Image: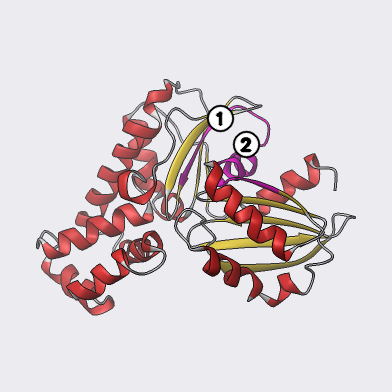
Amino acid sequence: MILIADGGSTKADWIAIHKNKEEAFRVRTLGLNPAVVEEEELYNRIINMFQLISIKEEVTEIHFYGAGCGTPKPVELLHKILASIFVNAKIYIAEDMLAAVYAATGKKPAMVCILGTGSNSCYFDGKEMQMLVPSLGYILMDEASGNYFGKKLIKDFYYKKMPKAMAASFEKEFNVEADYIKRNIYKEANPNMYLASFAKFMFEFKEEKYIKKLIKKGFQEFFKYRILPYKITSETPIYFIGSIAHYFRDVLEKVAAKNNLQITGVIQRPIDNLLAYHKENINV
């Protein structure tokens, strides 16, 4: 049995396949970002999923692509946890950016970007990813991501920059008590996921001028820091992965056009494309 996982900060999608490449089952766990989630919580999120534990001794390979897996220490932590559970498995861990590449373009050169709970980008030359700047996560980077927009919404609400009618809806939908917000950001697990949870508010009001302006500004910032430095041309294919890109594709395409670029494709959830890539390219 082989497990393929696309592990974001908010959720992780798992697919189990047999040696004959037939799909066995799919499950979804909470996010497994080892850069922000404590070891015990990571372990619990896996062992509490019955379908995964029921095959833990049958699994011979795990291909895990995850947010927070771009530097050695988080990878070592996650590898240790997976190895303690799936004792007979060879474990391969790579950052979620590589999963985005495989899902979007396979083996063809392209610019590939992630706009989900977090954000990132790379240029894939057909063989290797080229990343000009490593991601430093939700506090310092993650432009135009769910947590980026969550921070913007909270600040605009408190600074009274949000339209009054929208602010009333925001206050009704979320607990905006200052102590509650600060506790979730500074003391609870997954502050990035908590901040990104506010982004759903944008989906409900996506036609409002305030939201469109907010999204446009965030996308332009992403292009400025995460796409334009690669010096790509209008002929370069550009793919986006994630719900933020999916739900605001119209704004994304306008911002791309403003920068003399064109979006080739947007994929909300990459797991199906990732599975197809593995079936075609990995000897399972």
Q: Is residue 140 above or below residue 163?
A: above
Q: Which mark is residue 189?
A: none
Report the magenta residues as a range: 92-114
The percent coordinates of residue 17 (x first, y second) are: 80, 59
Kind of residue at badge 2: Thr
The percent coordinates of residue 33 (x first, y second) are: 51, 56
Q: Residue at x 44, y 32 (%)?
A: 262
Rounded to the nearest whole Å, what is the CA distance between mark 2 and mark 1?
Answer: 7 Å
**Dot 2 lies on which element?**
loop
The percent coordinates of residue 110 (x first, y second) are: 56, 30
Q: Circle 1 sits on which residue?
A: 110
**Dot 1 lies on which element?**
strand
Answer with left or right where residue 185 lies relative to residue 80.
Answer: left
**Residue reaching furthest to the right:** 20
Kind of residue at badge 1: Ala
Q: Quadrant of residue 171?
A: bottom left
Position of the N terminus by quadrant: bottom right
The residue lying toward the viewer, choosing from 213 and 188, is 188
Answer with left or right where residue 275 lies relative to residue 137.
Answer: right
Answer yes or no: is residue 64 visible: yes
The percent coordinates of residue 16 (x first, y second) are: 76, 62
Q: Is residue 242 magenta?
A: no
Q: Residue at x 45, y 41 (%)?
A: 120
Answer with left or right where residue 190 lies relative to residue 94.
Answer: left
